[in-house]
Image (tube, rainbow, N blue to C red):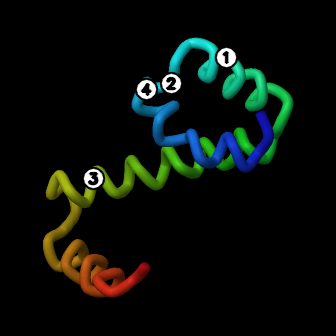
Amino acid sequence: MNCNELVELVTAYLDGALDPEARARFEEHLHGCDGCGNYLQQFRTTMGTLSAICEDTVDTAFRDRLLDAFHDWR
């Protein structure tokens, strides 16, 4: 597996949706690639932050400003 393939599969990996062979290849690549390991950690952090916003654990005014700021972002 190369870095581009890993990036495409990161969501499936975190959701536990990869078949055993793909998961093994994903994890093997992680062990040899610090860049992808960092990417995975950043992705987890981002998802955790977004989950906190969605769960109303963030001040309402701050959440509304964030949502407004990214409303048209693509």
**Disc 3 target residue:** 52
Task: Calculate the distance from the C-alpha at mark 1 to the C-alpha at mark 4.
Answer: 12 Å
Tell me the tag on residue 17.
4
Q: Nearer the viewer, residue 30 or 66?
A: 30
Q: Is mark 1 on a helix, strand or loop?
A: helix
x then y, percent, for residue 24 = 67, 16
Q: Is mark 2 on a helix, strand or loop?
A: loop
Q: Nearer the viewer, residue 27 or 51?
A: 27
Of the residues shown, which amino acid type is indicated by label 3?
Answer: Ala
**Disc 1 target residue:** 24
Of the residues shown, which amino acid type is indicated by label 2?
Answer: Leu
Task: Calculate the distance from the C-alpha at mark 4 to the C-alpha at mark 2.
Answer: 4 Å
Identified at 67% across, 40% down, the residue is 6
Identified at 79% across, 40% down, the residue is 2
x then y, percent, for residue 13 = 51, 31
Of the residues shown, which amino acid type is indicated by label 4?
Answer: Ala
Tell me the tag on residue 18.
2
Of the residues shown, which amino acid type is indicated by label 1?
Answer: Ala
Q: Which of 53 and 21 is in front in this view?
A: 21
Residue 69 left/right relative to 54: right
Task: Calculate the distance from the C-alpha at mark 3 to the C-alpha at mark 1.
Answer: 30 Å
- Among the 4 quarters of the image, the one containing residue 61: bottom left
Residue 63 left/right relative to 3: left
- Looking at the rendering, in which quadrant would you find the N terminus? top right
x then y, percent, for residue 52 = 27, 53
x then y, percent, for residue 29 = 77, 29
- Looking at the rendering, in which quadrant would you find the C terminus? bottom left
Identified at 53% across, 49% down, the residue is 43
Q: What element carries label 4?
A: loop
Q: Answer whether labels 3 and 2 touch (C-beta < 8 Å).
A: no
